[in-house]
Image (tube, rainbow, N blue to C red):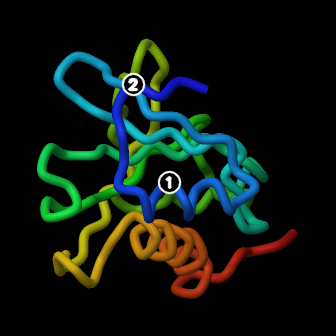
């Protein structure tokens, strides 16, 4: 796994305590955390994806925002996912951007809380519009 830049120690400890394979990469002027084998709730076309999080300079004071998935996620019932239709090229791989935002509070929020929010976004898609079977 590539480690092209460092994360705060608490983030490294959190990532290492998970079952995910993760790496940090630099693509042009952008720094990315890639989390491989990121689990996706039932109802999507994938069970695991690579989740990409852009790490802005100044993090952890600078906020983490949005998430990018490869391969792209679609609901099994073909209901469209709002604000998930923009593509992002990261090192030659096309990721699907999920444009989701929240109020970042330095000292309270971190990579750990951002990943918890991402998991909530994935589940909320079916909470607000349940999966239609059959």
Residue 63, position as x, y percentages in the image: 19, 63
In-front residue for pair 92/87? 92
Q: Is residue 77 left or right of residue 85?
A: right
Residue 20, position as x, y percentages in the image: 69, 50
Residue at image mark 1 = 12
Which class describes the residues within 10 Å of circle 1: few (<14), some (14-19), or many (20+)? some
For the C terminus, the image quarter is bottom right
| Residue at (14% x, 59% y) in the render | 62
Toward the front, the furthest residue is 9
Residue 81, position as x, y percentages in the image: 48, 60
Residue 86, position as x, y percentages in the image: 33, 39
Residue 8 occupies which quadrant of the picture?
bottom left
Q: Give the alpha-carbon distance from disc 2 to disc 1, as whole Å.
A: 13 Å
Residue 28 occupies which quadrant of the picture?
top left
In-front residue for pair 77/40? 40
| Residue at (78% x, 67% y) in the render | 42
| Residue at (52% x, 86% y) in the render | 128
Q: In the rendered view, would you say 85 is above or below 47?
A: above
Residue at image mark 2 = 4
Q: In the rendered view, would you say 28 is above or below 133?
A: above
Tally the numbered discs: 2
Secondary structure beneath disc 1? helix
Secondary structure beneath disc 2? loop
């Amino acid at each position: 796994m590539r480690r092209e830049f460092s994360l705060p120690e608490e983030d490294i400890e959190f990532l290492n305590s998970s079952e995910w394979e993760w790496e940090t990469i630099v693509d042009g002027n952008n720094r990315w955390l890639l989390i491989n084998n990121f689990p996706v709730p039932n109802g999507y076309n994938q069970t695991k994806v690579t989740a990409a999080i852009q790490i802005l300079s100044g993090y952890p004071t600078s906020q983490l925002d949005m998430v990018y998935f490869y391969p792209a996620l679609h609901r099994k019932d073909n209901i469209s996912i709002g604000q998930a239709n923009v593509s992002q090229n990261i090192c030659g791989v096309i990721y699907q951007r999920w444009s989701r935002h929240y109020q970042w509070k330095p000292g309270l929020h971190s990579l750990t809380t951002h990943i918890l929010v991402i998991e909530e976004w994935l589940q909320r898609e079916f909470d607000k519009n349940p999966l239609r079977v059959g």
